[in-house]
Image (tube, rainbow, N blue to C red):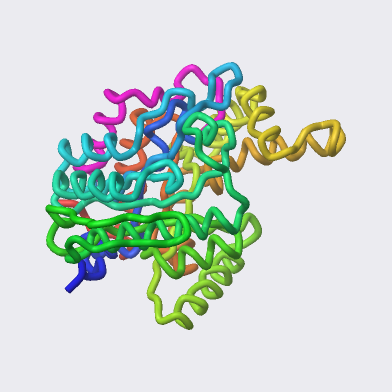
Amino acid sequence: MGVRAASNRYTMYNVNRLKIGLFGANCSSGRVVTRARERWSGSWADNLRIARFADEAGIDFLLPLGRWKGYGGDTDYQGENLETLTWASGLLAATRRITVFGTVHSPMFNPVLAAKQMVTADQIGEGRFGLNIVVGWNEDEFEMFGAELRDHQSRYDYAQEWIDAIKLIWSDAVDIDFKGKYFDLRGLRLKPKPWGGQRPMIMNAGASVTGQAFAVRNCDAFFIHASRVSIGETAASVAKVGQYAASLDRNISFYTVGLVVCRPTMKEAQEYFQYAIVDNADWTAMDSMMARRNLDSRAVGIDDYDKKRLAAAVNMAGLPIVGDPDYVTARLADYATAGLSGVAISFVNFNDEVPYFCQQVLPRLERMGLRQRTA
């Protein structure tokens, strides 16, 4: 019998209707392209501190970015980054309740090695490890590894073989071969198996039709882009993908990402957002990211380029949720209404801002019946 489906991991061990996670703490500046002096360091010491706090405060999960090279600019945005499987292992050893994901580029990790690394993390955390699988798109990062950046469809074809091999290695099969277009693996054997006989929870955030289909076929959770127009549009997106999953006899949960700026008053929150995200944006780093997507002022015109660059900076970390505790709570509750199971949240500085968020917003979500109080 193979490793069972991740039933209790699927709910991350609790009955919170809206899971809350922290996203991107393993990289300098996190998900905020800012020159603000208080921007996130991404250091191991700061990661350890916020992980322990989040664990005690009842935060459900930690989700890292898969990053190997920064984007330059005044801050070398995300230039200091911690590899996610060793990061997860260290944090799992230092915490007791929280789920910690590794974000893994399938083209950069041999599946035999990755399966062993992830099982090791899972053993350390006694079943609290999760996998966020990504196919990658930054050409210069692929060049660092001497890896091929395939066309879009082929990236997912490769990832399909990769995750098939991982699941086989995690199963009870012993001394079995796996042969496909991209892999020829012989005599596969892995001991120990994932903790408790259940494979880790698997996430993916493919935005394209191909990526979405990959997530529905293979994953327990799927990250969607929350609508900037209405909560109704977000609900419609969830319903559409949910129907597709049901047609394949798959049950999948939905998550999104967002940036939270929560202050005692709306005015304070809005002023800080303007200061950190707009007035002190690292525009040179933004230009670098725009160039990697083949966008520059010569191609689209300076006015259109400036609008696109501003929109990218404002939305880099996901949908901005900016306001006082009541406002932030209401917007997060909207996600639950739309059918989302959780939100992976970024902050300008996790250690500075997460305690206030946990003190003010989590109890409000508890009173709404969306979360349980942490013992």
Q: What residue sits 56% from the left and 64% below the top?
A: 234
State the image coordinates of residue 371 (x, y, percent, origin top left). Answer: 29, 60
Residue nearest the viewer, comparing 212 with 51: 212
Q: What residue sits 49% from the left and 68% below the top?
A: 338
Horizontal side of 339 relative to 8 (left or right) equals right
- Residue 274 in magenta stretch: no
Residue nearest the viewer, comparing 106 with 46: 106
Q: What residue sits 18% from the left and 56% below the top?
A: 194
Check the image and report above or below for 60 versus 6. Answer: above
Can residue 331 be seen here?
no
Tell me the quadrant of the picture where the N terminus can be found.
bottom left
Magenta-tinted stretch: 32-57
Quadrant for residue 211, please give it. bottom right
Check the image and report above or below for 33 versus 335. Answer: above
- Residue 46 in magenta stretch: yes
State the image coordinates of residue 227 (x, y, percent, origin top left). Answer: 60, 58
State the image coordinates of residue 241 (x, y, percent, origin top left). Answer: 52, 72
